[in-house]
Amino acid sequence: MFGRSWVCAVALATAPLTVYAAEYRERLPQDEVIYFLLPDRFANGDPANDRGGLRGGPLQTGFDPSAKAFFHGGDLRGVLSQLDYIQQLGATAIWLAPIFKNKPVQGNPGHESAGYHGYWITDFTRVDPHFGTEADFRTLVDAAHGRGLKVYMDIVVNHTADVIFYRECTPQSCPYRSRADYPDHAYTPYIPKGQEHIKVPDWLNDPIYYHNRGNSTFEGESAEDGDFYGLDDLMTENPRVVQGFIDIYGAWIDRYGVDGFRIDTAKHVNPEFLQAFVPAMLARAHDRGIPNFHVFGEVYTGATDVALLARYTRLHALPAVLDFAFAVAVRESVAGNRGTDFLARVFADDVLYEGGPDSALQLATFISNHDQGRFAYFVRAARPGSSDEEVRKRVLLAHAMLLTLRGAPVLYYGDEQGFVGTGLDLDARQDMFGHFDRQHPLYQAFADLVRLRESTPALRRGRQITRSAGPEPGLLAISRFDPASGREVLIAFNTSTAPVSARVRVNVSSQHFSSLHGQCSTEITASGSYSVTLAPLDYVICGARE
C-alpha cells in the first residue's frame, strides 16, 4: 500500500442512512457507483465458518490464510458489518464475486488451489458454507436495500467446477479436439467414484450436457466449446441447459430480489444462449418489481477492442459489458505514456454498441479488477522510480476519469485504501481485513468525486463530447450535458507532468461557469471558447451556469 491506513472500529449498522432508500429501484444502471469485492478477502464476520464446515487441513477445507490461492476467512457477515463503510464511500451498489457453493480444492497434486473466488461452482442453489448461509445472504440483501444500496450477483453459466474427467487424457494434458476431426465425440467422459451427484441441480451431473472436447485454446470454436482451464464446459446450446440456468438464476431473483447480474466468461458462451437467458432474467426481475435490473457481461480483452465488446451487445443481446477498452485506455494514457487521443478513440466508437452512445452509459467501467490487477500496480510497473505522491496523483486522476466520464463506474475494493498489489489475478486480491480507514486521503477523494457525480446529473446520464485530445500526454477535455436542462459540464484532465493551459471549445450558450472542482474561469474567452489551466496530473470540473 501507499499512503496512510489504520484500523477503524466500525459498529454494525443496518438502518437506512439516505433519503433515497425507498427509491433505489428507480435508479437507472448509469446512476450507480458499483463497489466490487471478493467476500473471502473483504471482512471476516464469523470465524466459525472459515473452514466451510469441513474437517482436515487446507487440502480438505480449502482454508489457509497464509496461501494466496486458498480461503482466508471473509464472508457475508463481514460484508454486512462494513455496509456503513461502503456507503460512506459513496457506492450505491455492491457487486459480490460468486457466493455459490464451490468445490473447495482442485488441481493436480502439488498444484492445488481453493475456490475462494467462487468460480468453481458445484451447487448453484446454495451459498458456499465458507461464506455463510442463505439466511446470511438474505440479511445482507435486506440490510443493503434498507440503505438504498443495490446488490449485484456475479453468476457463471459457461462452466462448473472440474468434476468430469476424460479417459484418454492425463491430468497434465488434455488438448482440444475439434468438431472437424472428432464430429461425434472427442473424449470419453467419466465422473470419479463418489462425485456422481456432487453438482446441484442434479441434471448438471450428466456428461451429456457438456462439450467434453478438452481444454480451450481460446481461439476458434474452442473459445466456446473448450474447457476453461479444465473447468467442465457446459453445452449452452442445449435447450435443457438454457432452461436450467433460467430456472436457477431466476430463483435467486425471486427469493432475494437482487438488482443485477455480472455474467462471468460471457465471451465463451454462444449467442443463442444469451439471447434467451438475458431477456428471461430481465422479465423475471420486472415481475419481481425490479424495473432497472442491471446485466453486464465479461468479454475479456487486453486491448481497446470496442468492436469486440460491441458485438456482444448486438449479437449476444447483452444490455452492457464490462468496459475493458476503457480500462486499457486509461491504463495506457494515465499509468503509461500514450496520448489522450487513445481515450478519445474509445469514446468515438461508442456508436458501435447496440443503441449507440446512449447504451454506452450503462457500460460497467473500471480501471482495476481481480483479474487484470490494480491501477496502482500498473503505475508502479510503468514508472518504477515514481514517488508515493506521483502514484497517488495518477491513481486519483484515473479515478476522476472513472467517476466523471460515461458509464457505470466500478470501484475495486481496496483501491480507496491505497492497495497496490504485486501483479495480476492472485496478486491483486489482497485481504481488506482491518483496512477500513475513512480518513485515508484516497477514500475521502473518491467520496468527494462520488458526491459530485450524484449531485450532477450530467455526470451520470449526460451525453458526452470530446473537446480536446492529442497524440502525447497532456490535455483531455470532455463536455457532458444535463439531460434535462442541457447545461454543459466541462471536465479537463492533464495526464502530463507539466502544467497545461489551453482554450477548448464549448457550446456558444455556455458563457458563464462555476467551479465544481479545481480552479475554473468564470467567463468564456470568446464565443464558444473557454480557457483552462491545469497543474501536472490534475483535473478540473467546470459547470456552465445562467
Image: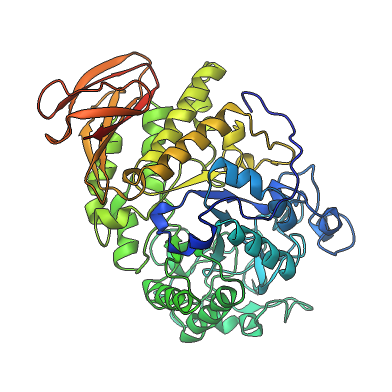
Residue in the picture at 34% in, 69% down? 317
Measuring from the top left, give residue 287's x and y in whole percent: 47, 80
Pick the front one: 359 or 214: 359
Measuring from the top left, give residue 156's x and y in whole percent: 55, 66
Measuring from the top left, give residue 255's x and y in whole percent: 61, 76
Instruction: State the residue lying farthest toward the left.
Output: 527
Q: Is residue 390 left or right of residue 431?
A: left
Pick the front one: 242 or 152: 152
Q: Is residue 521 left or right of residue 68?
A: left
Quarter occupied by residue 421: top right
Instruction: State the residue lying farthest toward the right.
Output: 56
Pick the front one: 175 or 72: 72
Q: Is residue 250 placed above or below 485 in the rendered structure?
A: below
Q: Is residue 6 left or right of residue 474?
A: right
Quarter occupied by residue 469: top left
Q: Is residue 21 placed above or below 502 in the rendered structure?
A: below
Instruction: State the residue lying farthest toward the top.
Output: 498
Which quarter of the figure is the N terminus placed in?
top right
Measuring from the top left, give residue 56's x and y in whole percent: 90, 59
